[in-house]
Every structure is written in structure tokens, then in C-alpha cells.
Amino acid sequence: ANGVTFATDNNVGHWIPVSERLPEPETDVLTFCCGNIDILTYRYNKWGEVRFMFRDECGYWKETFGEVTHWMPLPEPPKEE
């Protein structure tokens, strides 16, 4: 359509079940939780436990409300031309 082509496969990677492997701490990853896809950070909470977390609107780290079942590394950003 108007010279635009559409991707037919997902070349970002594959979803990794958290039951098989977890990301390295302090890493931003794409996550699947409760039917939603989000970017979360796998990081240490204030008790020293590693959890999937996000920053709230005030900048405070919060743990996710639902259970993350799958994750994948973020793709590389596009190169500046």
C-alpha cells in the first residue's frame, strides 16, 4: 500500500517464560503480564529481592501488580542517520 511493506515475522526475539530463565538484574525488558505488554525493569527492591518494577508518575519504583509470565530483551534502537 503506497510503497509501504509490512513485517510478516517478529525479528525482535522470542518470549522467554520466567519459569525457564530471568533477565539480569537492573535490565529493562519487554514483559507479558495479565494480557498486557509493557517495558519493565528487573531490579532489586528495598528488601534486596529482584522483581519486575516500573516507575510511577512521581518517579518512585513500584512492583508490578500482576504476575509476569514471559519476557524478552528490548530490541536495539534505530540508528541515527
Image (cartoon, grey):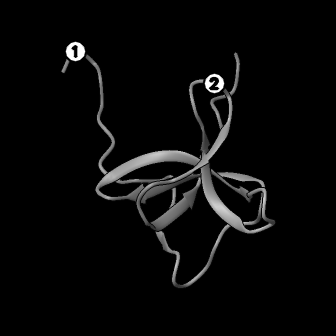
Tag 1 secondary structure: loop
Question: Type of residue at label 2?
Answer: Cys
For marks 1 and 2 on the same chain, the one whose residue lies earlier in the sequence: 1
Say which residue appears at 22% left-offset and 15% top-offset: 2
Tag 2 secondary structure: loop
Residue 8 placed where, x, y %? 29, 49
In the picture of the structure, the residue carrying the numbered disc 2 is 58
Say which residue appears at 40% left-offset and 53% top-offset: 10
Residue 14 visible, this orientation: no
In the picture of the structure, the residue carrying the numbered disc 1 is 2
Q: Is residue 19 left or right of residue 77?
A: left
Other residues around mark 1 within 10 Å, as few (<14) / some (14–19) / many (≥20): few
What's the CA distance linking mark 1 and mark 2? Answer: 43 Å
Q: Quadrant of residue 51?
A: bottom right
Residue 31 vertical placement versus 39 (above, below): below
Residue 64 visible, this orientation: yes
